[in-house]
Image (spheres, grey):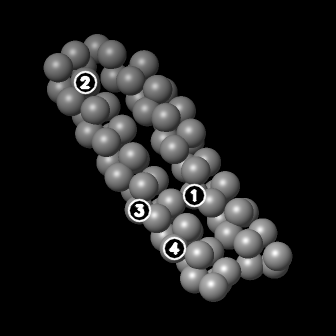
Amino acid sequence: MGLLAAAIAAGLAAVGAGIGNALIVKGTLEGVARQPELKGTLQTLMFIGIALVEALPIIAIVIAFIVMGG
């Protein structure tokens, strides 16, 4: 049962991160389309946001390994 829980947790975390990254990139592209002069600032914020969103599946994988081992 622990293996199933770990697999579901990792899968849902990956799907959530994918959706989150897509929304961040979408917002950045819309912002650049409206104000091209802010491209550098928006791109920097996009990379920071993506890094924070990608922390979620990494944490989920660690928790999944803990559940599998315990």
Q: Is residue 8 left or right of residue 31?
A: right
Pointer 1 residue = 57
Q: Earlier in the sequence, mark 1 or mark 2?
A: 2
Pointer 3 residue = 15
Instruction: In this rendered view, identify the residue nearer to me: 23 or 35.
Output: 23
Q: Secondary structure at mark 1?
A: helix
Q: Secondary structure at mark 3?
A: helix
The reply to whether callout 4 and callout 3 are in contact (CB within 8 Å) is no
Question: Mark 2 or mark 3: which is in front?
Answer: 3
Q: Position of residue 9 (x, y in %)?
A: 55, 67
Q: Is residue 39 left or right of residue 68?
A: left
The amino acid pointed to by label 2 is: Gly
Q: Earlier in the sequence, mark 4 or mark 2?
A: 4
Q: Which of the 4 quarters of the picture holds residue 25? A: top left
The amino acid pointed to by label 4 is: Ile
From mark 1 to mark 3, how far is it between C-alphas?
Answer: 9 Å
Q: Residue at x 31, y 31 (%)?
A: 28
From mark 2 to mark 3, how far is it between C-alphas?
Answer: 24 Å
Q: Residue at x 42, y 55 (%)?
A: 16
From mark 4 to mark 2, how far is it between C-alphas?
Answer: 35 Å
The quadrant in which the C terminus is found is bottom right
The reply to whether callout 1 and callout 2 are in contact (CB within 8 Å) is no
Pointer 4 residue = 8
The amino acid pointed to by label 1 is: Pro
Q: Is residue 7 left or right of residue 36?
A: right
Q: Earlier in the sequence, mark 4 or mark 3?
A: 4
Question: Mark 4 or mark 1: which is in front?
Answer: 4
Instruction: In this rendered view, identify the residue nearer to me: 69 or 33.
Output: 69
The amino acid pointed to by label 3 is: Val
Q: Position of residue 63 (x, y in %)?
A: 71, 63
